[in-house]
Amino acid sequence: MNEPVDVLIIGGGASGAAVAWNLAETRMRIVCLEQGDWPRSQDFPSNGRDWETRQSEDYALSPNRRGGIADYPINDDGSPIKIANFNGVGGGTVFYAGHFPRMHPSDFRVRSLDGVADDWPIDYSTLEPFFEINDRMMGVSGLAGDPAYPKKEPPMPPIPLGHTGEMFGRAMNQLGWHWWPADTAINARAYEGRAPCINIGHCGHGCAQGAKAAVDVTYWQEAVRNRIEVRTRCRVSRIETNEDRMAVGAWYFDANGEEVFQPAEIVIIACNGIGTPRLLLNSACERFPNGLANSSGLVGKNLMLHPYAMARGRFDKQQDGFRGARGFMWSMEFYETDPQRGYVRGYCYQFTRGFGPATTAINGMADNLIPWGENHHDAFRHYFDHQAGMVSICEDLPEEINTVTLDPGLKDSNGIPAPRITYRIGENTQKMLDHSIARGTEILLAAGGTDIVTRSPLSHAGWHLLGTARMGKDPKRSVVNEWGRSHDVKNLFIVDGSVFVTSGGVNPTSTIQAVSLYISDQIKSRLHELFD
Amino acid sequence: MINHQDNHPIAALSQPEQECLRAIAGCIIPPSFKYGIPGADDPAIFDDLLASIRRDGDALRNILATVDRNAGGRLADLAPTERCALLARLRDERPGFFSVVEALTSRAYYGNDAVLRSIGMEPRPPFPKGHDLPQGDLSLLDAVLRRGKVYRDADVSGHSV
């Protein structure tokens, strides 16, 4: 058995890093168990000539395709949207695009405003100071004054719009629709010892420059300097409790496959919307037969994935292509509810540049734009560096039929049951997807686009994992309380996207981290009554 | 569904499988006299293709077996025009069937120095040199600002969970 610690954090991704950093000043003994390794930037695909190949192999988005030592299998046969993640220090931030919108004020009040789902027990103003801290810690580039948000001041200027952004900006102005340079967790200039972005592109498979704010190069650097220990290749299988219904620590498999117990006074779970319910359900015991913290029966339910749609066109003028960050500009024109659209809530657009040559060819053949044979070459040159478009990120409403459960047969390399995803796109979300394709096509046409291709939903885009251990004041209808503590186990906290009550229609990392900072702030301020 | 644990064996394709794959690659991207570049069945490019087969090995073998079966034995034994005609028919009948071969072929082909130069790309990894991009004209945002606020206030007491 290991030496006891004050705080055990499970998971070294976006939320685990933020909570670790924020608790460091308490001088408590804090250990983070992470199933993967520290990423090595020299291994990222953009270091090599074969970067497009490597993006689909060891740095593939799907853990089922990667099948690395740190990865656990996910049975997502029961979902039209397949799960994407990265398992290692930094978690999903190693692979995300760095597109960094906050959720909006209305996102926390969907029941009151639109009569669907539930309101959060906290609101935008609760999180606002933590958004600001997080923007500073991660290093956010952006432009103040966006009329789609309350006032905020990104610490760096925006990353380049490029030719493609300018073209879409003009098109959006022609249509009279909102657009703005995106907040991105990418350095527009050197920031806190990290280098500026040099427009490598391919942010979604690891940033070799270190300009993208993955938490292994932001929060964790400061947290480790503050004596927090990150123990890698340690996969937690279950949380142990005592007769007082308190957590006493966690069992994990170390790098040698040995099962080890780590005692702790406080346990904080930061394993994302799939890993967290998996762990809680696998921690079922005599005292908690339906899984830990699951008296509500809601652990693993209400999974939200943010279905994406995509529209892409071809333009006569050369575009930015594979150069530059993929998240550089957004539109919130269709974000807020408009009853005339036939659905409630909304989506944001994230405008996208083009692709590398191989991906252009692969997409072109799949879309029947680039043929086999002699005409391949002319067609390829017609489209390469001449395509651009957008994706819509649609708010997914919580539904109890969308679930994470334990697969009865599939197990990971340590014998821990794999998660099984059962998910379907709701009617409201489908209408939203359709709307976003129609409006996206209008934008492309306004920009002079031809040969428009659309996809809905994007099947590979299950990278926002939310809602499976939601927060609330009512223990019968939520898993954790309004400050992240389990209703059932009074020294167990959850800080990742599982606690989201609703999903908003934006990439969630900024909000996940703000929630994590908020919960850790609550822990600090309530230390003397934490378990009451 | 899941292809996990030891899921990227690099067992070499057999000689007949390689010949079938090479014939398909040559039909997907033949040489171009117009641009002065080789096809995907060029020996060096094809070697790169073979070396890149990792996680797709099983899927690829199934495709090659199906193609050879439809060729009445071996695709490579058919005349080049017959090969491409057969493959075109199969592709029409089974959309997506060749996606693995198209991906492997494209990645190998568009990693070749001569090919990259012919499409205007410098043959190098993206890092550490990166690329230049113009900042863009932020005065275009004046029109957006003139519209004013587009988000909803939400200072309503809630119906929270």
Image (tube, coloured by chain):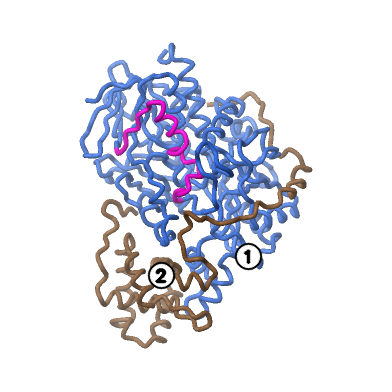
Chain colours: A blue, B brown
Magenta segment main secondary structure: loop
Image quarter (top left, top right, bottom left or bottom right) of the N terminus of chain B: bottom left
Position above or below: A384 against A478 = below
Q: Which residue of the protein is positioned furthest toward the right in this rendering?
A: B146
Q: Callout 1: helix, strand or loop? A: loop
Determine contact: label 2, label 1, CB under 8 Å: no
Residue in the image at 70% along x and 38% along y: A145
Q: Amino acid at mark 2?
A: Thr
Mark 2 crowdedness (10 Å alpha carbons): few <14, some 14-19, many ≥20: many
Would residue B97 be visible to someone looking at this image? no
- Total number of numbered labels? 2
For this rendering, which residue is in front, A9 or A246?
A: A9
Residue placed under numbered mark 2 in the picture: B105
Residue A42: x and y in percent read 39, 50
Q: Which mark is residue A318?
A: 1
Residue A326 in the image: x percent, y percent?
A: 55, 52
The residue sitting at 27% across, 45% down in the picture is A409
Q: Chain of mark 2?
A: B
State the separation of the CA atoms marked 2 and 1.
Answer: 25 Å
Residue A209: percent from left, percent from top:
48, 48
Q: Which residues are magenta?
A: A205-233
Q: Is residue A218 magenta?
A: yes
